[in-house]
């Protein structure tokens, strides 16, 4: 992964001309502005603060080659991939770099490292793929003198497969593509495809309650976890592997979403499925966002949701067309057809079905009936296939946008169906107002995805001209306005990006003062010295 | 509810002759033995230990009429409806009676009562319908001088209905039938039908992670809870009402299943559904239990499970026939037909579908195909309808069995499909061995229900001749053997009966030493004086 951006060089994506001209004119970009990015050797890196004794103890556990203090290792573990992370990286400020990157090979080594770090007063930041977009992996030291990144990429085994029960016990450092390749060779799949899929890990998904593009059908990761093992400074916690239990509150739920502040997830048993025989993606158009939301609700509450469901608002649809991600819709004939049918400024939706040939055919037929009855116009499979091809491309595009001086950020929430319209309007206006006040009026777009019988998530993307020299205050103003609007209007501060450092200021509003105290009591028991991922999740 | 047994007098059920003769001969019952049961006025009741000052403080919160110390109130809150509870009640030992029964009318009154009890050193036992079968409501005092039962039956309002999001916010004291009557008047249902349905409450279901007969389809109660309010001695905890969230570990999951040891659940927001238009119950026969388990697994993993799914083993099928619960199967023609098809000693299964007419027809057609392919023989709708009629009768029957000197007890667990056969065999032999050693060889039967993609629950019922004068040691020996076998062979100590007092000895084996410590840390934070339901859940 490039330390200053997304992915590897080969995957880079450039903005298509239509989208570039849309953003240039609507955000009043300065086309003459050059790319601001610093070379690795010029990055400012704090001096490594790990004591020689602490270092020796870590080496004693994992071996010399697995305690790394070189510049690239430290810089590439200095943060995740949020907008502020990328801004800081481009400016060459690696204040969040760990003093060392340590790579354990086993659960026992993790336990040994935690003992050593607790004794030596070293903070520990569990690091999977490092794709956090909420400041989840910055190596903050808390009250300690040094901090290490615990890179779990060596722990990448499939520990066991239970084909009868359809579960797989996995180590945390397995990356998405490798996991799917290995499961695929056995005719199986996990079906978990977050946008970060290519560069994120099993442990990261479980630690952050991740949701993927097919989670409407397969379930978010928290619905797939059957059991977990946590190595905490206070010891090992292993939950019982049963499909369900009434033996008190499930500790599994305390570990899933604990974001490294309680310990290190060293194993997870996840539900898997047979690899789908067939796959069908289809695009739909709705005259308004509201009409589309009503159609999605009807579909979900009739138990007829597809595995992938996504409905863009008018603005996101407009960008899709400019990006060419809408397949045939950018062509004149497509646009003319939509206008003729009264869908000129309409909203695009995608449905995706996976499974056996007969089941896919039956389900999509039933869903199509419901969507048509609710005002939907089928656009066929071409735009759907086009979306599928480009579905992991957005984070690459972000690098190109940053090169052009565009601020681009996403945020997400979830709420009840009855509150969806009000929350959508509130977050939109909060972002427009906060950024317009600074003289950088934004483009704000949104989609609905991750459907539940009682509600759905709202996923916002916004763009604005960067305030040169004030990129971070500009971002902070927008983030603050959006977060406050979400909490004030009945949303949750995050549906699947997790809390990290960026959402920590809202966690008390989310869970209440007593709720926060309860989480702190759990942390104190599992991590009495407070070495685990300081400054994240719990403010 | 009768203090010494189940339900009201009107619902009483007597064992049919065929079943009586089956049990009499196979358990070597003594037909001359008389009924042992004591009159209310002869019950031994400990002297009420509530101080005058504590009493005045409770009266100040709820009013004079809502602090009850009469004999019937105290005796009927002395325990739940487990086999040992009923044995003790029949012997007139109400050692577990609370010193007073207090009936709050609001969440604020509950908070006031907890303040008063914490100040006065009075233990508090939340009491819904009192149907616990694991000793969950016995008024143990822990380290305190007195204990009250907090009877929540006055808090029985539907606080709000969100028809768009299909959720209902309910008070805890609502009983099953009244809830379904009120939701039904609006064309809605919760769809939660535990065997205790007629006499259990919303709060009790949530506090114990209850599962109902239709939970394969509707989901167990923990899957239906969207948000909860807990009044704890340390304050109020209210979780955010969102369909999903990644804002840290969900505190909702700590409260659901907390069995009154953390505080009192004073409100719950639950997912509801439109009342089903159609309902279809069908019975099936499989030549062996193993074949039936394989068929159920195939059905569940193909996403084709009915809403109600239940597969009895050979022994339970035999009792069903004797009880006449199998509809036409007790008639000679039915039996002859089964023998002719090679299903003479076979296993009975039920499938139940609910929903729109077209969906029920489609789903049952698809499921029938799968079951037939896996060796199932359809027995039509008659036995299914018969089961449906009698589905809340079993607890009534238990009273009749106790009258006849029969020990009858149930216990349940859950495990992965790959481990189901081994766990089934282990629990069966543990029970047979433990009770045979005492000279009372049992009849042990079992059914599979509550299907999950990765596994299912096993529900055991066993019968033995009571050891007169040693009913409780006899029960304890059987329970100990079964619990140990469950933990040793990969099961969970309870799938939906909860922990209470009876399963507390196994909770450390279930969650581990560190896991238990974490639960204790949560309890210490929410209930610093340890007044909440002492002796339950946490040993």
Image (cartoon, coloured by chain):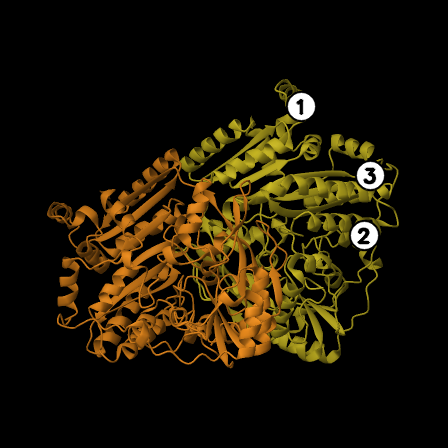
Chain colours: A orange, B yellow
Neighbor class of circle 1 (other Cα within 10 Å; few <14, some 14-19, many 20+) is some
Callout 3: SS? loop
Q: Name the residue under label 1.
A: B344
Question: Which is nearer the N-term, disc 2 or disc 1?
Answer: 2
Closer to us: mark 2 or mark 1? Answer: 1
Q: Nearer the viewer, residue B472 or B504?
A: B504
Label 2: state its secondary structure.
Answer: helix
> Gap between marks 2 and 3, in whole Å?
24 Å
- The CA span between labels 2 and 1 is 40 Å
Chain where mark 2 sits: B
User: Who's the residue at 81% across and 44% down the image?
Assistant: B434
Q: Which of marks 2 and 3 is nearer the N terminus?
A: 2
**Chain identifier of the residue bearing label 1 in the image:** B
Residue at 78% x, 73% y is B49
In the picture, measured across the screen, residue B389 lies left or right of residue A39, that is right
> In the image, B91: left or right of A206?
right
**Image marks 2 and 1: residues in contact by CB distance under 8 Å:** no
Of A236 and B429, which appears nearest the observer? A236
The residue under label 2 is B90
Label ID, residue B441: 3
Q: Where is residue A195 in the image (x, y as percent from the top left)?
A: 35, 57
- Dot 1: what SS? loop
Tell me whether the residue at label 3 lies in contact with that at label 1, contact meaning CB atoms closer than 8 angstroms: no
**Residue in view at x 81 percent, y 52 percent:** B90
Q: Which chain carries label 3?
A: B
CB under 8 Å between discs 2 and 3: no
Give A248 or A150, whichever is nearer the viewer: A150
Q: Is the residue A198 above or below the residue B423 in the image? A: below
Answer few, some or many: residues within 10 Å of disc 3's Cα (few below 14, many 20 plus, some between 14 and 19). some
């Amino acid at each position: 992964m490039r330390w200053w951006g997304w992915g590897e060089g080969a995957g880079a994506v450039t903005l298509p001309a239509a989208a570039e001209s849309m953003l240039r004119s609507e955000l009043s970009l300065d086309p003459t502005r050059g790319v601001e990015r610093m070379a690795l050797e010029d990055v400012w890196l704090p001096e490594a603060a790990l004591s020689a004794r602490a270092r020796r103890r870590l080496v004693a556990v994992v071996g010399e080659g697995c305690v790394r203090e070189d510049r690239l290792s430290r810089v590439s573990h200095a943060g995740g991939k949020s907008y502020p992370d990328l801004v800081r990286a481009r400016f060459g400020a690696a204040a969040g770099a760990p003093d060392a990157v340590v790579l354990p090979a086993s659960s026992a080594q993790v336990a040994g490292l935690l003992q050593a770090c607790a004794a030596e007063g070293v903070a520990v930041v569990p690091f999977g793929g490092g794709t956090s977009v909420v400041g989840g992996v910055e190596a903050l030291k808390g009250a300690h003198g040094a901090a290490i990144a615990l890179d779990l990429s060596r722990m990448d085994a499939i520990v066991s497969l239970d084909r009868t029960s359809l579960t797989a016990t996995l180590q945390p450092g397995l990356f998405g593509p490798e996991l799917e390749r290995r499961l695929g060779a056995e005719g199986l799949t996990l079906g978990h495809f977050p946008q970060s899929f290519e560069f994120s890990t099993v442990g990261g998904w479980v630690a952050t309650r991740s949701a993927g593009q097919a989670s409407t059908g397969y379930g978010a990761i928290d619905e797939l976890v059957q059991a977990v093992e946590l190595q905490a400074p206070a010891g090992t916690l292993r939950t019982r592997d049963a499909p369900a239990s009434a033996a008190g509150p499930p500790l599994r739920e305390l570990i899933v979403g604990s974001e490294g502040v309680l310990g290190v997830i060293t194993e997870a048993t996840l539900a898997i499925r047979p690899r789908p025989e067939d796959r069908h993606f289809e695009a739909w158009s709705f005259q308004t966002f509201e009409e589309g939301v009503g159609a999605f609700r009807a579909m979900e509450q009739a138990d007829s949701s597809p595995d992938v469901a996504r409905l863009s608002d008018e603005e996101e649809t407009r960008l899709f067309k400019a990006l060419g991600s809408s397949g045939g819709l950018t062509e004149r004939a497509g646009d003319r057809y939509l206008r003729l049918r009264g869908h000129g400024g309409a909203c695009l939706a995608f449905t995706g079905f996976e499974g056996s040939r007969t089941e896919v055919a039956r389900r999509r037929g039933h869903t199509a009936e419901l969507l048509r009855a609710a005002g939907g116009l089928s656009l066929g499979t071409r735009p759907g296939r086009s979306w599928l091809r480009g579905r992991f491309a957005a984070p690459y595009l972000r690098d190109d946008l940053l090169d052009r001086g565009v601020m681009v950020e996403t945020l997400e929430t979830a709420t009840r169906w009855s509150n969806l319209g009000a929350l959508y309007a509130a977050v939109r206006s909060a972002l427009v107002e906060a950024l317009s006040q600074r003289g950088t009026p934004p483009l704000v777009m949104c989609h609905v995805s991750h459907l539940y019988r009682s509600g759905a998530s709202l996923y916002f993307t916004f763009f604005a001209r960067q305030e040169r020299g004030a990129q971070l205050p500009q971002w902070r103003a927008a983030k603050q306005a959006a977060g406050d609007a979400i909490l004030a209007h009945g949303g949750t501060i995050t549906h699947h990006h997790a809390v990290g450092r960026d959402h920590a200021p809202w966690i008390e509003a989310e869970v209440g003062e007593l709720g926060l105290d309860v989480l702190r009591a759990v942390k104190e028991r599992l991590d009495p010295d407070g070495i685990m991922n300081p400054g994240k999740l719990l403010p």
